[in-house]
Image (spheres, rainbow, N blue to C red):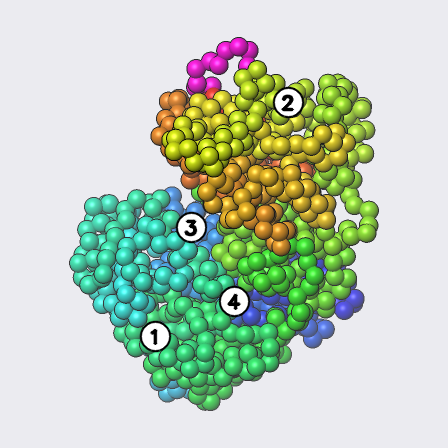
Amino acid sequence: MVELEAELRAAVRGEVGFDVTSRALVTMDASNYRRVPVGVVAPRDADDVAAALEVCRAHGVPVVARGGGTSIAGQATGTGVVLDFTRHMNRLVSLDAATRTAVVQPGLVLDRLQEAAAPHGLRFGPDPSTHGRCTLGGMIGNNSCGSHSVAWGTTADSVLELDVLTARGGRLRLGQDWAGAPRGLRELVAGELAPLRTGFPDLPRRISGYALDALLPERGADVARSFCGSEGTLGILTEATVRLVESPRARALAVLGYADESAAAEAAAGLLAAAPLTVEGMAADLVRTPAGLPRGGAWLFVETGGDAPGQARARAGSVVRAADALDALVVTDPAAQRALWRIREDASGTATRMPDGSEAWPGWEDCAVPPARLGAYLRDFRRLLAAHGLRGTPYGHFGDGCIHVRIDFDLLGAAGVARFRRFSEELADLVVAHGGSLSGEHGDGQARAELLPRMYGARTVALFERAKGIWDPDDLLNPGMLVRPAPLDTNLRFAVLPREPLPVAFAYPADHGDFSAAVRRCVGVAKCRTTEASGPSVMCPSFRATGEEEHSTRGRARLLHEMLAGELVTDGWRSTEVRDALDLCLSCKGCRSDCPVGVDMATYKAEFLHHHYAGRRRPLSHYSMGRLPRWLRLVAGTRTAWLVNALAAVRPLAALAGRLGGIAPEREFPRLAREPFSRWLRRRARPRGRVRAGRRARMEAGGAERAGAGRRPEPQAPAVHLWPDTFTEYLSPSVGRAAVRVLEAAGIVVAELPTRPRPFRDSRACCGLTYVSTGQLDEARAVLRRTLDLLDPLLPPGPADARGAPVFVVLEPSCAAALRADLPELLPDDPRAARLAGAVVTFAEALERLAPGWTPPRLDRRVTGQTHCHQHAVLGDTADRRLREAAALTGELVGGCCGLAGNFGFEKGHFEVSRACAQERLLPAVAGAPEDTVILADGFSCRTQLAQLAGVRGRHLAEVLAEGLEPEGDGK
């Protein structure tokens, strides 16, 4: 393929990638299938596409068009050259509000079109749940629909004209009345009018096969409409003119509760008479928490619109009255509606895990039947599942009779794959028996094309083959899809993975200790590829900064998959391709909470680095920042912080130290505290006898209990141990001092953690965060074991919620997250790890749990800033929100990541990405805030980023509350 690559590089102006990484990133879409391409081309324009087609045709190499890669039937994968339209051909060419039309390139993400149309009161009708990353080209290729299809139809209903290149270089402009039809197509239709009029099911979600019936004279001989849903097998789309619809000025959402999904399905068709915008259904199995939903085991989401809020609400009320539901809720607040819709949109990922954690897969994701038959079909579907010993939870577009479901097929072994085939064949027959379509939204691809004869019969399928031959006589475009398809049980992406679990450092409890199963979590939904973060979401900051697939969570998961497969990435844990893709992962853990299937790339990165550098020299930053607690302990033990600060202020010396430590030259060294926090705490407590107050209180209470003297013990103030994390201890002790003041004001006794007098060894409790983030997992486990040994006298013998269990307040969110999540996964066999993890609380959680009656000072200030990414992903911020509200601190903190992310933003080569992450949400929020706004940033990294990039001081919530207390006096 060297000659092919050379000719493509000479012929096209866009990027040509035949390297391992470029190919590995597109081996899969969101389906069960995998094909390894020979190369990837990112064309800049239609001329590039034509040039690439010419070269590939000369070499007899197939071509596959690819958009967002969210197809779930395998049609966005191929063994030839993949055309990636997302990199360059992604523009909105024009938008005409007067004619309600737009001209788009195939790589344009749907949300970008919606944003451009919204100021004109317009929108594109179809809206798949992947609207933040699916492209218009992919939607046209699959004839996508979405939740509003009951109102605005499928993508084919919104297409006016299409500019298409054929495999042999023809440039066609497709439209009505045979516009752009290739030679021979009109004659084919004229000779087959009878089967075209009688051989296609009449239902709103019939996507399977070619839409040849759109070419009938009574339907306007619409070549553009007929092209929709052809999955890139007929021609390559280069531009599209699409129709926009008027968006309702106001919307209301009626959420209707039913006993189960069959009852909801029976009710759905009866609601269509109210002309709703959506009728979506889902069952309780797919809802992580039913909070905010009405009573029931399944729900219908019915959206109504109007010119005014009252009109939309009145229509929603009419739906509720006609629904005969167990319970109902009408939501008019836009933010509350978005929160509910996120539950539904995340179902495509949530459904990949059954309630017991076992895996479930697509393959029969979107069958459609007439809406009036949906209830009966679901009952038959459930019986068929049971007969095969399978499980799945249906959800989807109940108003259109289209059902999504992920099923717990065993696609790893021969017996499970055989059952997958038998079930597929029987389900195809069941769908046809109900008058349905094998695909109701996502296309046939490899998953269903083999079964099209069961739906259409041999004669109509033969017509499909003849049509393919007219458009693409050389079978160059996406072969193996729709016609002459590959068997549905071949090319499965799981077949190449190792059968036995690999020896790994983390426990992966949700994946039964199997790293392959953890990597398999990524099914390609690609929520990580959204180009704009919204609300509290974090994932995936590096992708939003670079726009490159390899820097998305999905891209990294794909490379890890190929590493495990060993076919394309052949050097396993030593892979430089995987290392380079993971290099820009900030370890923000945003994917752990924001990914619908719970991919935890921060953990996978640490695991990979652990193996990659085993027995080898590491990057300099791993020694400098990865072992930061050790160096700072040494400085504190020798009381030389003043000297280090003085030397760091000398630019040549700081630059030399930065080079030796692998630190970005753009970064300044944070100043070290002259007095560590713990030293201050001991000095402050000594005159008042407070240093071990918490321990004495428990000992005295225990002694009185053993004495059995019948005396009623004096009530003791609740006690906590304040965790001296590395950042609070050595870099920002003011946070610790403020926390002590606030906790004591709330009536909580603060006790110091025990230490051992070993100035040149690990003598303090440590969460191991810096070792984990740099993949030094052997060292991390050693540090954590010493921590458990140190704290062993404080830990109860039973679970962490046992009577007398300690409370450890951790002020640094990343350290708290490490103790809660990483500690038990790195030391799963030490029961003390789970007990310590369960005893860790944040500052706000401590106040809420131990001083529920305390009222914080009323500050009446506006705040801005950013919720720490680890707080969002692992800890949650509910207690913080309540504490801010109680203190009259108003305003919302933004989501996203500050970009510094511990060692990441300090490492050489990361500064530009680090700054880009901060510029996305944090810096604009601070720059746009009124002058007296309090900048909240609980993480030391966030505060450092603000200081170095914006010149502003961010403060921990404890510091802000402490300022509202009465002065403590005595110079403390």
Q: Earlier in the sequence, mark 2 or mark 4?
A: 4
Say whether residue 661 is left or right of residue 820.
right
Q: Quadrant of the C terminus?
A: top right
Amino acid type at image mark 4: Glu
Asked whether the viewer can see residue 692, the reply is yes
User: What residue would you read off at disc 1?
Assistant: 378
As helix, strand or loop, the secondary structure at mark 4 comes to: loop
User: Residue, x 34% and y 46% (percent of image)?
Assistant: 336
Residue underneath mark 4: 359
Circle nearer the N terminus (3, 1): 3
- The x, y position of residue 57, in whole percent, is 68, 72
Q: Amino acid at mark 1?
A: Leu
Magenta stretch containing residue 82, yes or no? no
Q: Nearer the viewer, mark 4 or mark 3?
A: 4
The answer for how far apart the CA atoms under marks 2 and 1 are is 67 Å
Name which residue lies at 28% across and 49% down.
331
Read off the residue under disc 3.
114
Q: Are marks 4 and 1 in contact (CB under 8 Å)?
A: no
Image height check: is 872 above or below 746? below
